[in-house]
Image (cartoon, grey):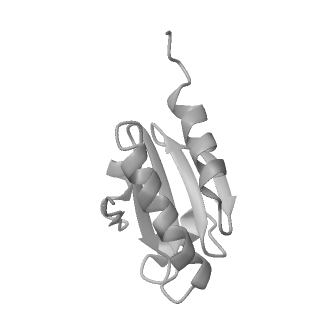
Amino acid sequence: MMEVIFLTKENFREQIDYGITLVNFIEPACDSCREQLPIIKELAQELRHKATFVKVNIEQEKELSNEYGVISAPTLMLFKDGYQVETLVGLQRIEELRQVILRYTTMGDTC
């Protein structure tokens, strides 16, 4: 499985500005966050050529959490070329996450 890297306010914008990025806003003590991580890692491996998968610790990155209105964990946000296009709150099943991500990776394809 691929490792999902942590972002900070210093590298967040650079990461989400281009392509598709799924940001997993987590809290280390959160049971649902720990359950969500293997799902994210599996999708990161499966969709590695279509999207980037990252995480943000909401306790350490309060400024980012506030900027994006994150009030509970896990919160997953999908960004496309710097724009927030989806927000999902709570534990998400792999099938739904895959579907949401693929909807944005195929937009604009001509074949």
Q: Is residue 16 left or right of residue 39?
A: left
Residue 49 in picture, x, y percent from top left:
35, 37
Q: Examine the image and state in which quarter residue 77 appears.
A: bottom right
Which residue is depicted at the point 37% across and 51% down?
Answer: 45
Image vertical order of residue 19 relative to residue 24, above or below: above
Residue 93 in picture, x, y percent from top left:
65, 59
> In this orientation, which residue lies closer to the viewer: 105 or 46?
46
> In this orientation, which residue lies closer to the viewer: 39 or 14?
39
Task: Note whether residue 36 is visible.
Answer: yes
Residue 6 in picture, x, y percent from top left:
35, 68
Which residue is depicted at the point 52% across and 74% down?
Answer: 26
Q: Examine the image and state in which quarter residue 9 appears.
A: bottom left
Q: How many marks?
A: 0
Residue 99 in picture, x, y percent from top left:
62, 41
Q: Is residue 78 left or right of residue 38?
A: right
Image vertical order of residue 95 relative to residue 8, above or below: above
Which residue is depicted at the point 52% across and 90% down?
Answer: 29
Q: Examine the image and state in which quarter residue 10 appears.
A: bottom left
